[in-house]
Image (cartoon, helix red, strand yellow):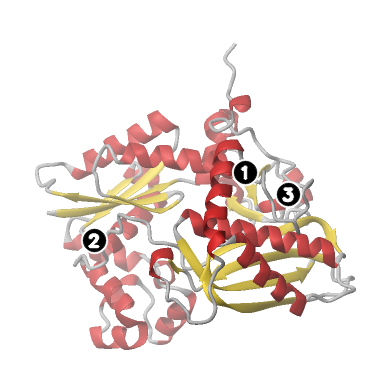
Amino acid sequence: MRVFALVDCNNFYASCERIFQPTLEGKPIAILSNNDGCVIARSNEAKALGLPMGAPAHKFASFFRQHDVRVFSSNYPLYGDLSQRVMDVLRQFTPEVEVYSIDEAFLHFDGFQQYDMEAYAQQMRKRVRKWTGMPVSIGLGPSKGLAKVANRVAKKFAAKTNGVYVIDSEEKRIKALKWLPIADVWGIGRQHARRLAFSNVKTAYDFTLLSDEWVRKHMSVVGLRLKKDLEGTATIPMEMVPSPKKAIATTRSFESLITSYEEMRERISTYATLCAEKLRKQGSNCHAVYVFVRSNPFMPDLPQYRNGILIPMPFASQSSLTVSKYALKGLERIYKNGIQYKKAGVMVTGIIPKNAQQLTLFDKEDARHDALMQRIDHLHRKYGPHKIKLANQDLSRTFKMKQAHLSPRYTTDINDIIKVK
């Protein structure tokens, strides 16, 4: 018997803060985006107060004070480290672990016929909590799709399920699918949800009653695989090795408005360099660079402007020099004087493996770039990031986000380790 499980960390970002500050238990918590821009995560208590996702922090300052919402800047080094610790614990229960996101993982159990899977999942849940402090919910089923459904049941009815729910019978499968709205089904986006609603498909169970031909025609083979998964036939495979990213982006909201082309040029070059570093880290090259700029939409009294452009490259590259060069060409085309800019970004796309690129007859990368980039990466690993910069970057400036509510990096910075007196 094959069993799949989805382990989901409860209110992950908020729980990361609570692990080291137990007094936050039961308190409403909001986590802010880069530069403390808007709300990207909320505890259940904050949701109950009506705090919306994406709420601009400056507009909800009085709301935070009125309801005593504890506000934190994003602490990604801490969150990433705790995520890794949770995944390491899960690998003690089965070697087949697919890290789906920073707070979710699929597990596959093959040959566990003699196990009480609900008790095994409870043991897993308790160990994760004891060893990392992280509360998790676990759903189990005969497919990844049903494991996802079971996880929603476990989380929604936590008091009754004790955080674990197993779909191990046809009766449980049908009951769970009839309860789950179609818009909440894993893999059903807004567009498909609207199309299905027009076909009177209201629940996940209604979706399984559609013909295979209709689903394949309107939702492709991906939708058909999901349907089969919800019917109990495992068709969505485990992905043990993370797939290379199809696009890599570096975007930032500025701490203060930018009005100078030279300053914007420096920022775009820096973002392009960061994208190139990420390309090299995953062993990829890119074929195109997308650049965008925009003003502050929350200051309507100022002139508003937003624009972006995709710049194809004549050859695939992972060189900081090359990616920055073409990103700046894009900036030249879209930059507009007289605008006070609040945000900009660079995205590299058309990503391919470095060792599988198509050679061109006339245009090619300078052969010296590869050795130079390898040396720069080596020095950054040895002495720390951003020690070596391009000449068009500000050599004296290290970009620092606004993080007025940042908690200590308890597990990743020796200076922030908790001291026991």
Residue placed most toward the observer, 248 or 142: 248
**How dense is the environment of label 2, judged by Cα within 10 Å: few (below 14), some, or many (20 and up)?**
many
**Quick one: label 3 or label 1, which is nearer the N terminus?**
1
- Residue at (66, 60) in percent of width and height: 271
Q: Which residue is mark 2?
A: 143
Q: Which residue is mark 1?
A: 385
Q: Is residue 167 above or below residue 204?
A: above
**Quick one: label 1 or label 2, which is nearer the N terminus?**
2
Q: Which residue is mark 3?
A: 399
The location of residue 409, given as percent across then percent down, is 60, 34
- Residue at (71, 40) in percent of width and height: 405
Kindly report which numbered mark, 3 or 1, lies closer to the viewer in this rendering. 1
**How dense is the environment of label 1, judged by Cα within 10 Å: few (below 14), some, or many (20 and up)?**
few
The location of residue 100, given as percent across then percent down, is 39, 55
Quadrant housing residue 130: top left
Task: Label 1, secondary structure: give it.
Answer: loop
The location of residue 44, given as percent across then percent down, is 54, 48
